[in-house]
Amino acid sequence: MGYFTAIVLAGDRGPNDPVARAAGVCCKALSPVGGQPMVLRVLTALEQSPAVAGRLLCGPPWPAVEQNARLHAGIAAGDFGWLATQATPSASAAAALQTLPEQVPVLLTTADHALLSPRIVDYFCAQASHSGCDAVVGLARYEQVAAAYPGIRRTVLKFQDNSYCSCNLFAFLTPRGRAVADFWRQVEQQRKRPVRMLRILGWTTVLRYLLGRLSLSAALARLSHRLGLRLGYVLLPFPEAAVDVDSIDDWMFVRRLAGGD
């Protein structure tokens, strides 16, 4: 029986998003991959995972929902909930978390995680549940991602011990762990003010990272201490878990992998 409630962030720049324009749809989340909109692929993967008990969709805008019969019908039938997006992803995540009981473990992902599968969800949730942490992030080793998909462009987190790619999977396992969403909002609000952002993250931590002298474990330990909780990570053995759709090239790439278009 499922024990996580999954939040899917599906906000974007609407028809002005480059992927949405290329796909000829009103928002990126509805861009087709493998014969169906990306957001429905994500919702289906979550539905098929025994680790997930409920699903809450944050976005896309209601007019976009009404344009897709399956999405609209799923919400109308109560198969998954829907909330309007907020100004930023972190604000949307915080708003969605506030609608759920504190004791409920939450899995957070995004609508553009087009290659998400039940096995990825199952593995991440199982490892996160046994981590003993308050909040957990999913990562994949960059060398594994690059070996599986030569030439792919991903944001790489370069630590002293290894290089990693984010997998757009986050788990909030305890009420205390939800403080990470508030911290995310602080960082996001200061992203155009580097000095203030550095103060939030901690000068020493940032400097050690820039000098290549910070390990992933040390970074999480420092951030855990700063937030007063325990942060951890799950290393995912699936390179496709690190592939989301940030650009038209990404969209074309995942369509080739998924087939069916």
Image (cartoon, helix red, strand yellow):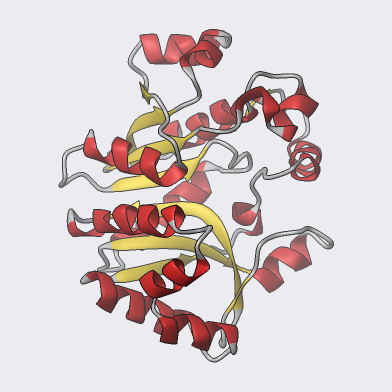
**Relative to 192, residue 59 above or below:** above
Q: Give how far across and how far down residue 219 sits, in percent.
A: 42, 80
| Left or right: 147 as drawn, with respect to 107 | right
**Relative to 42, residue 194 above or below:** below
Q: Quadrant of the N terminus?
A: top left
In the displayed image of the protein, which residue is found farthest to the right?
Answer: 151
Q: Give how far across and how far down residue 30 sits, in percent.
A: 62, 24
Count numbered badges in the picture: 0
**Relative to 175, residue 232 above or below:** below
Residue 113 is at least partly visible in this image? yes
Q: Residue at x 30, y 46 (%)?
A: 106
Q: Residue at x 36, y 30 (%)?
A: 56
Q: Quadrant of the C terminus?
A: top right
Q: Give how far across and how far down residue 129 sits, in percent.
A: 30, 59
Q: Nearer the viewer, residue 198 or 241?
A: 198
Which quadrant would residue 213 be assigned to in this image? bottom right
| Left or right: 74 as drawn, with respect to 247 | left
Q: Nearer the viewer, residue 6 or 175?
A: 175
Residue 2 is at least partly visible in this image? no
**Relative to 238, residue 157 above or below:** below
Q: Residue at x 30, y 54 (%)?
A: 182
Q: Give how far across and how far down residue 27 sits, in percent.
A: 62, 24
Q: Nearer the viewer, residue 23 or 105?
A: 23
